[in-house]
Structures are given as C-alpha cells and as structure tokens.
C-alpha cells in the first residue's frame, strides 16, 4: 500500500524583466519529511533574462528545459552570482493543485472563528503582500552588509483596522541567513487583548482541538524559548488505510511546525514504531529504512530516531558526540499537555485531547504557570530531572517591520520586546 502524502502544485511566476510578459509554469513538489529547498534560475525564452524562483525540491529541476542553474538555499554565499538574479513575482490566482495529497496539513476548523476574530486574509490583502515581499527581499539581499547579521526571526506589524482593538503580527519560520521571505508563508498571530485563558476553556471537537493546537504550537515555536509536548497517542492505532494515513498526517504536521532545536516531545515508543512501519510500506522508495540508511533523516524523524540510542535520561551519545535529547519515550502516563516555555511564565494547553481528528468532544483549557509550578504539577511527574530552556540566547533579536499605509519600515528589535509589546 502506498500512502501518497506529498503535494504537487503548479505555480505561475512572472519573468523578472518588468518589460517582459512571459510567465513560467512550474510544478513544485513538497514532501513532508524529505525536502531539499532551494532556488532554480530560469532563462526567459522571450527576453533572455534570468529569473530566480524558490522551490521545495531543487533536484527535480536539474534537467528541466529552460533551467540554467539550481542552488540549495544555504549555498548563496558560495554562488555570488545568485544574489544578482531577481526573484520572480509569484502569481497567486494562477496557482493550481495538480496532485492532491491524501493528507492536508491544514486544520479543518478555523481558530479565528473559534475565538470570534477576523480571518487573516481579511486583513492581509494581495497588494500589501507585494509591498512587504519587496521590502523583505531588499532586507534579505542586504543582510550581510548592514544590520541583518545574526537575525533569524521576522515580524510584520500590520496597522489596526477601523474600530479594531487588536494588531496582527505575521512571521516566517525560515532563517534569513539561508533564505528569502515570502509573505504568504507567514503565519498570523494576534497580540493585544486576545486572552487565550478566557477564549480556550471548555469542550471542543477533536478537529477544533487540533485547530487550537496548530495555533499554539506555531505561536510557541516563534515566540517561546521551548515547546513541550506530552502526548501518549499520535493518530489512531487501528490497522486500516484511513488510520495509517492519520498517523502520517499528524507526524507530518508536527515535523512541519516544530523547530526541534527548541522542542521536547514525550510520547510512547509504540507511536514511533507505528510511524516507521507505515513509512516502510511506501512503494516510491522513500521508506524510513531508506532515509535512515542514506542519512536523510531530519527534523522530528532524526530526533525520534536518536532517542532510541539514548544512554542517559537527559542526554544521548553517538559517535562520541553528546547532544541534548529532544524526544523521550515512556509508558507511565496517559495525560496530555502542550506548553510554551518563556522566561517569566509557561503557557499550557491541557485536557483530554490526544492528537486525533473527528467530531468526538474533548475538554481543553489554557493555563499560565510559573516555571516551578509547571515542573511540580506536570513535567516532573512523568519525566523528572529534565531541564527546560528558560532563556534561548541564540534567538535574541528579530527583524521588525511595521506597516503604515502602503509603506513598510524595518529595524531590528529584541525578541523579548516583541513578546512583551
């Protein structure tokens, strides 16, 4: 049985020459666990200008017609000519999904509707996206010459709407040192008077719980110093195609959302064994054993595999190199909680919700604790002795862009100030 959980989209990109009307039609394939993001440079057949396009897997384009160069995202410093090639303009209305995945990693229920807020697209229009894209692309090009060095977060503050009391912040997960930004990849989070403690408290369907979890994990991955997930079950255990796809669905979701350098995942070993078994049923060659043999495990898969070789409770050792353990396996819990660790507090989602889908009701509520309270009431009960990241010194500054009308001003700002604003 083959579980096709990749997605291929046909995207349209305009030639970088403003006087040329040529549009590139590009098939861009995205895999949940194996991606080699990079840039493809196309030679225009009409005006012969070069156009740079960002893709999820640059290897697919090496022998394509019209391609004059392919580059990994991290290879910009090795290819000085790449920085002089203009990024093509993405035409959103011409985007078409030509190969539908069995697994859509987007929540079925809108978090914004659950909390009574406007949908992000009602605030973030296409014209504003283009303005921000141009500004961020200029900042990307200048990052090594001016104030961008060492910055690996970006926030865009949008102006308040009429009669509105809230601001949007939009952010991208990618590092500026490796990639340029696309405003469409930014994820909106409210600041201001949206109280999660007041909004998240009660019974929700599993689909609604997933929507809330999706929002909180993205919020914590960007703003918090560490993300803690304690969940005994990821997907259902029934041996049928639908449930196997759910397992791939939710592990793919976690892999895409989480930054494993600042994540602590606690689950049962059986859950990872299920994932490996289902990946090994793939018929396209991208099995777990294949990825492991060729050293292609990354992100969550790599951390979960490393946990199998742990030597101590809070560290593992391989080839003489010590690393912090990011995934732990234990069977001594049935509780479920998800947390974002800040310097001065810990935000916690807690209730009966495993990472499942459906219309069955679960209880879920949002709490705020001190570090000691959280460790005493939650973490130490199932995983004593593990240290939390109270402060992440590697992420201390961010690129802060403020939109006023159709103008965007950029400056660097302490991440702590962005959080507390």
Image: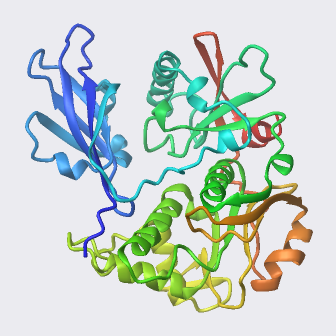
- Visible residue check, residue 78: no
Query: In the displayed structure, would residue 113 be above or below residue 18?
Result: below
Specify how the rendered protein is coloured: rainbow
Tell me where residue 155 appears, x and y as whole percent: 63, 34
Q: Is residue 393 left or right of residue 144?
A: right
Residue pictured at 72% horizontal, 36% vertical: 190
Along the line of sight, the residue nearer the viewer: 302 or 141: 302
Q: Is residue 403 left or right of residue 271?
A: right
- Visible residue check, residue 415: yes
Residue pictured at 45% horizontal, 33% vertical: 182
Query: In the displayed structure, would residue 337 be above or below residue 383?
Result: above
- Which residue of the protein is positioned furthest toward the top in this rendering? 19
Along the line of sight, the residue nearer the viewer: 32 or 222: 32
Tell me where residue 348 appears, x and y as whole percent: 79, 61
Query: In the displayed structure, would residue 335 be above or below residue 51?
Result: below
Tell me where residue 125 appears, x and y as whole percent: 53, 20
Circle count: 0
Along the line of sight, the residue nearer the viewer: 154 or 338: 338
Tell me where residue 163 appears, x and y as whole percent: 79, 16
Residue pictured at 50% horizontal, 17% vertical: 131
Residue pictured at 47% horizontal, 20% vertical: 126
Q: Is the C terminus in the top left, top right, bottom left or bottom right quadrant?
A: top right
Q: Is residue 49 left or right of residue 319?
A: left
Q: Is the N terminus in the top left, top right, bottom left or bottom right quadrant?
A: bottom left
Query: In the displayed structure, would residue 219 be above or below residue 121?
Result: below
Name the quadrant containing residue 76.
top left
Name the quadrant containing residue 232.
bottom right
């Amino acid at each position: 049985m083959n579980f096709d959980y990749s997605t291929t989209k046909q995207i349209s990109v305009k030639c970088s020459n403003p006087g040329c009307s040529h549009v590139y039609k590009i098939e861009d394939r995205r895999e949940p666990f194996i991606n080699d993001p990079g840039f493809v440079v196309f030679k225009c057949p009409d005006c012969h200008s070069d156009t740079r396009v960002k893709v999820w897997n640059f290897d697919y384009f090496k022998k394509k017609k019209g391609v004059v160069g392919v580059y990994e995202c991290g290879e910009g410093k090795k290819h000085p000519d790449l920085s002089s090639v203009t990024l093509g303009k993405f035409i959103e209305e011409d985007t078409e999904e030509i190969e539908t995945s069995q697994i859509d990693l987007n929540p079925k229920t809108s978090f914004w509707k659950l909390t009574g807020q406007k949908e992000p697209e009602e605030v973030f229009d296409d014209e504003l996206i283009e303005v921000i894209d141009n500004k961020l692309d200029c900042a990307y090009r200048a990052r090594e010459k001016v104030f961008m060095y060492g910055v690996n977060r970006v926030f865009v503050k949008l102006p308040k709407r009429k009669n509105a009391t809230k601001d949007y912040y939009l952010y991208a997960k990618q590092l500026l040192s490796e990639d340029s930004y696309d405003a469409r990849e930014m994820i909106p989070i409210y600041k201001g008077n949206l109280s999660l403690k007041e909004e998240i408290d009660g019974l929700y369907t599993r689909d609604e719980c997933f929507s809330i979890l999706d929002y909180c994990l993205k919020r914590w991955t960007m703003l918090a110093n560490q993300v803690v997930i304690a969940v005994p079950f990821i997907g259902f255990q029934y041996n049928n195609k639908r449930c196997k796809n759910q397992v791939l669905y939710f592990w793919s979701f976690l892999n895409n959302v989480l930054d494993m350098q600042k994540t602590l995942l606690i689950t049962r070993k059986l859950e990872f064994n299920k994932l490996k078994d289902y990946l090994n049923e793939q018929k396209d060659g991208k099995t777990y054993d294949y990825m492991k043999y060729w050293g292609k495990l990354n992100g969550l898969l790599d951390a979960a595999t490393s946990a199998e070789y742990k030597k101590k409770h809070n560290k593992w050792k391989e080839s003489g190199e010590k690393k912090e353990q990011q995934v732990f396996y234990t069977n001594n819990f049935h509780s479920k909680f998800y947390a974002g660790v800040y310097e001065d507090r810990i935000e916690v989602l807690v209730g009966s919700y495993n990472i499942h889908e459906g219309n069955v009701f679960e209880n879920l509520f949002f709490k705020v604790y001190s570090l000691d309270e959280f460790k005493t009431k939650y973490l130490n009960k199932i995983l004593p002795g593990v240290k939390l990241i109270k402060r992440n010194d590697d992420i201390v500054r961010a690129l802060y862009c403020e939109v006023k009308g159709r103008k965007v001003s950029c400056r660097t700002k302490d991440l702590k100030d962005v959080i507390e604003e």
